[in-house]
Amino acid sequence: MFRRVLARASEDRLLLVLLAALVPLLWFTPESDWALHQLVDWKTVGALAGLMMLSRGLEESGYLAYTGQWLLQRVRGVRLLAIVLVLFSACLAAVITNDVALFIVVPLTLSLRRIADIPVGRLVIFEALAVNAGSALSPVGNPQNLFLWQASGAGFLEFMLMMAPLALALTVLLIIVVPLAFSGGVISVCGVAVDVPRERGLFWVSLLLYSPFLLLADEGYAAFAAVGLIVFFLVYRRRLLAGVDWLLLLVFALMFIDVSLLARLPVVRDAADGLLQMPGQTLTAAVLGSQVMSNVPAAIFLTSFSEEWRDLAWGVTVGGFGLAIGSLANLIALRLARQPGLWREFHYWSVPALLGGWLIAIALGAL
């Protein structure tokens, strides 16, 4: 098992890039105290670990595949299926946050490939973009909204009304693009996978653990709750833990460290000042900053330079498109999919979506 983990680590390009970037960042960062563990948001890492275990339990129970089979019996067109999944992902993300939505929708989508011939990878791409768009509506839909909502002092409803035009417009944009990405053909269902084995006990255990885990995570105990889940599954279903992508946790930890060190560099702070002078100012700075350090760190970083809350919130929302690093949700979706070539295809759709989203935000902001 250890050799398998090492083999996967050596093939993980993002992990290797983050490790390679760490050395020069440590060298050039002024006043580095080397307390790297303090740069990691362990609450986020713990929440991610717990969600990966619970979603794995739902996937192994067989009920996601069963639900997918039920869906395919009612939605037989590829385009219609894509629209349904995009809308479902966007709406779900606005209610239960974008990362939790992905841990439900992506495993469900992956289960469909067992019973039908559909472009699963492209569906996952659009689901990742959809949760970035839908989660923008709610103050608690994603981490950057939660931070900016608290920092701005806006009311819950006030923040939602501020974000609603952009969230709706971005979701409509994705729906419009669906016919370009998916054929109008009928879904071909594979007869060999009609009988889906299901484990009711594993399904209910995994499902019922979601609520207490999310409650503990919301109270700041995500890391402790994740350790509790590891102990529980070691006793209840040890083989389930072997199917969890533990390297993703290392990727996230390294990302927090690298981005925090990057934000300390004087040249980066000077670059932020320069971005704020570009057309679109705060909005453009947030969009471009997200492409460098992801939208959550970009939101935190740019509050030191601007208090244009709407432009900042809109900018990091649009910045979730573009490069995969623009949003942690993108990384989660692509890692869950585990499909060769998907990272490259993701950018075929996400970069144009970034340009379209930026133009939409500029136009809406001018109204």
Image (cartoon, rainbow, N blue to C red):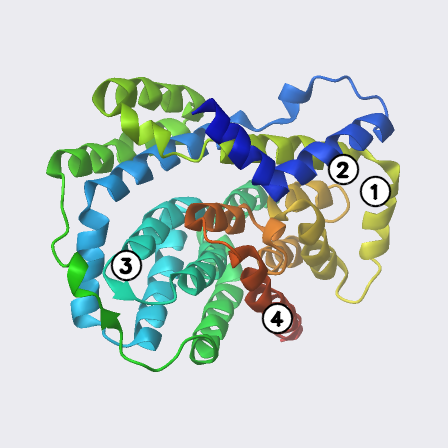
Q: CA distance from mark 4 to mark 3?
A: 27 Å
Q: Position of residue 107 (x, y in %)?
A: 33, 49
Can you tell which mark lies on residue 269? Answer: 1
**Dot 1: few (<14), some (14–19), or many (≥20) neighbours within 10 Å?**
some
Q: CA distance from mark 4 to mark 1?
A: 28 Å
Q: Earlier in the sequence, mark 2 or mark 3?
A: 3
Q: Position of residue 265 (x, y in %)?
A: 83, 35
Residue 2, placed above or below residue 113: above
Residue 14, placed above or below residue 217: below
Provide the residue designation for mark 4. Answer: 352
Q: Callout 4, which amino acid?
A: Pro
**Dot 2: few (<14), some (14–19), or many (≥20) neighbours within 10 Å?**
some
Residue under the image location 37 percent in, 52 percent down? 106
Can you tell which mark lies on residue 112? Answer: 3
Residue under the image location 17 percent in, 71 percent down? 74
At numbered mark 3, what does the secondary structure look like: helix, strand or loop? helix
Q: Callout 1, which amino acid?
A: Arg
Q: Earlier in the sequence, mark 4 or mark 3?
A: 3
**Quarter placement of the N terminus:** top left
Report the mark closest to the observer, 2 or 3. 3
Provide the residue designation for mark 2. Answer: 263
**Dot 4: few (<14), some (14–19), or many (≥20) neighbours within 10 Å?**
few
